[in-house]
Amino acid sequence: MTLAQSIVQILGLMLDLLKIIWHNFVQFCDYIKINEYIVPFCIKLFIVTLIGSIIYSITFMVRQWIKTTCQTADIKQENYNRIQKGAYYTIVLIGSMILLQNIGIQLTPIITLLGIIGVALGYALKDFVANIIAGILLITYPPFKINDYIKIKDWQGKVIDINIRVTTLQEGNTTVFVPNSILFTSTFAIIKSVE
């Protein structure tokens, strides 16, 4: 027997051994049904990656849109940051709900519980929520500007700040914080407008 024949014989035995190992591995995988777990896991991993990428892209585009809109509307940096964070958390919350639903987690009980909590908090904080919504509308579509002199109900003064919850008026040494819901739902007069 030559050296070449010995090498071929050893390679043949190694190939037979590999075939036996592979055959046993495939039988083992079929026995523990690993294919039933790996394929759904890979599909769920792909869905998580895809939806996560979409959420990231949408938040990036919305942040850019808010940035350009706030710059053209000349909105203060602190209000811009609040609007941007609110939009970011809203998109992430909705995206997370879609993601959880797509990987098989039932959201109906969670949404029902959050709805009940939301109704209770909404009723308890209705004035606060009304002020926030009115503040967003006043910042987005301002009927008056900073340094305008306005009168509403029993208050009057120069507008020195408009933020998300209250509008600040100053008359002499007196500073009045008027809730935005009152400004939005009541009649007010602009006594002196700054151009």
Image (cartoon, grey):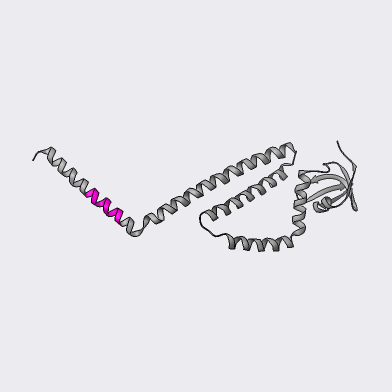
Residue 193 lies in the magenta stretch: no
Asked whether the viewer can see residue 177, the reply is no
Please tell me whether residue 81 is drawn above or below residue 31 in the rendered image.
above
Q: Residue 7: x percent and y percent?
A: 15, 40
Direction from residue 98 to residue 146 in the image, left or right: right
Q: Along the line of sight, which residue is nearer the eye, 79 or 181?
A: 181
Q: Is residue 98 left or right of residue 173?
A: left
Highlighted magenta segment, given as a residue range: 17-27
- Figure quadrant of residue 75: top right
Quarter where residue 34 is shown:
bottom left
Q: Residue at x 27, y 50 (%)?
A: 22
Res 127 → quadrant: bottom right
From the viewer's perspective, is 186 left or right of 62?
right
Q: Is residue 52 visible?
A: yes
Which residue is located at x 64 percent, y 42 percent? 62
* Rendered view: 134 above or below 2: below
Provide residue 171's location: percent of width, then percent of height.
89, 47
Q: Position of residue 95 (x, y in %)?
A: 58, 50
Name the one closer to the observer, 157 or 55: 55
